[in-house]
Image (cartoon, coloured by chain):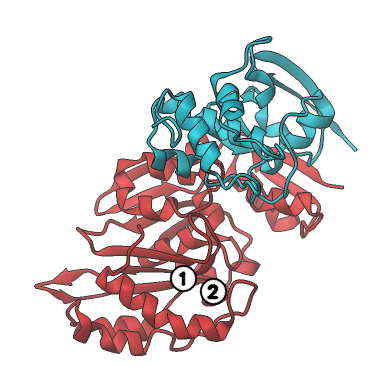
Amino acid sequence: MVTVTTVDTLQEAAASSAGQAVFLGGGTLVMRSVNYGELSVPQIVRLRSVAALRSIRADGTRIVIGAAATMGDILRSSEVSFLHPVARQIGGPAIRNMATVGGNIFAPHPYGDFAVALLALDAKLRLSDGSETDLESLLAARDNEKRLVESVSIARPAGDDFRFRKVSRVKPKGVSVMSLAAWLPRSAGRISGARIAFGAMAPTPVRVRAAEAALEGATLDENGIAGALAAATQGLTPPDDGLASGWYRSQVAPVHLKRLLLGEGSRT
Amino acid sequence: MTKKPVQFRLNGSPAAVFVDEGQNLLDLLRRGVGDLSPKYGCGQGTCGSCTVIIDGEPRLSCLTLAETVEGQQVETTNGLADGPDLHALQEAFMENFAAQCGYCTPGMLMAAKALLDRTPRPSREEIVEAISGNICRCTGYEPIIDAILAASGQPTRRTG
């Protein structure tokens, strides 16, 4: 038996969810659990209106996205056109009109492709208690997080500095074998401060710091990225699931990272 | 179990019903209102057979909490025909053999209607994208794509 509580503010919702309730965002994860009788606790809390949490706006050199913005909202916003190839890879049109940016951050493996892009773009989160945290920290302790996400601030990448790639077995829509995102700021042709993120290669989206370090000062060509490819899976123990074994994921990750970095075989 | 009152518009007509807590929109439409046109397929957002249009956007009724449609406009396949006159998409699906077992058809029709409402003459690529969340295990999709092309007054593989 499920109960549903409707509240007016994110703070009230957080107070409920910190107790026992599950927060309902777009419904694509929570309602599936309801339908299958798999909801972790039989209480749902939701907001009466999410209109105030759907905005997408520029904020200096960064962009702030409301947690309730849907993948459809992302696709309709010219402010985040660099994220359109990412949002387009999330489900079909109906799912995209429901699935939210905030929800994607909490999507369990192998979902959460959008969060991979956010992680590469140095995402910082504003939470329901007014505090801020970086996405990487939240993901590391995601299962115990009781606060709710209000908005996500990301870097605005220049030119083609941002890349995303989703690897799946079913076209045009399928679940990720893995997803990859890279933010590659360059100065005089050399990479400085690269961020590389993988999805479906660990229980949550993760950065690969060894690969990022190997790209520091490198040029974006076969020789320049060789060190990053060698370090592509350093520190990762990819999971086995029905889509791929962890061994397979480890073997093909450098191949897809190379394609991502050099723009080869891009389907976006 | 507590019942909650919900008012919305279903295919242009007002609907006022009581929903169970946690009830999804598909269940409300089928059992609560008696509109059997949207189908239950997977219950997890994979198949698209429960697709309806809410406030002009295609959504999955099985993943929509019923009480959230308060004040919204819901469209289902039941609302497509005007008396004996079928909707252009229904005619085109019939003429182009776009339905075999028919289970995916209501979802396909609503996904296609949502596309044509915004893009009256879509490209083949736009059609493929629009129905990419809807699974059909019978037709191989090509007759469905043809039907949507035909409904939008464009040549198909057979006529083109």
Q: Residue at x 40, y 29 (%)?
A: B155
**Residue B70 image-quadrant placement:** top right
Identity of the amino acid at label 1?
Glu
Cα gap from disc 2 to disc 1, whole angstroms: 6 Å
**Residue B125 image-quadrant placement:** top left
| Residue at which label 2 appears | A140
Q: Do the CB atoms of the residues marked 2 and 1 lie less than 8 Å apart?
A: yes
- Say if B141 sits above or below B32 in the image: below
| Residue at which label 1 appears | A136
* Letter of the cyan chain: B
Element carrying mark 2: helix
Q: Residue at x 41, y 45 (%)?
A: A74
- Say if B8 sits above or below A143 in the image: above
In front: B17, or A257? A257
In front: A183, or B105? B105
Identity of the amino acid at label 2?
Ala
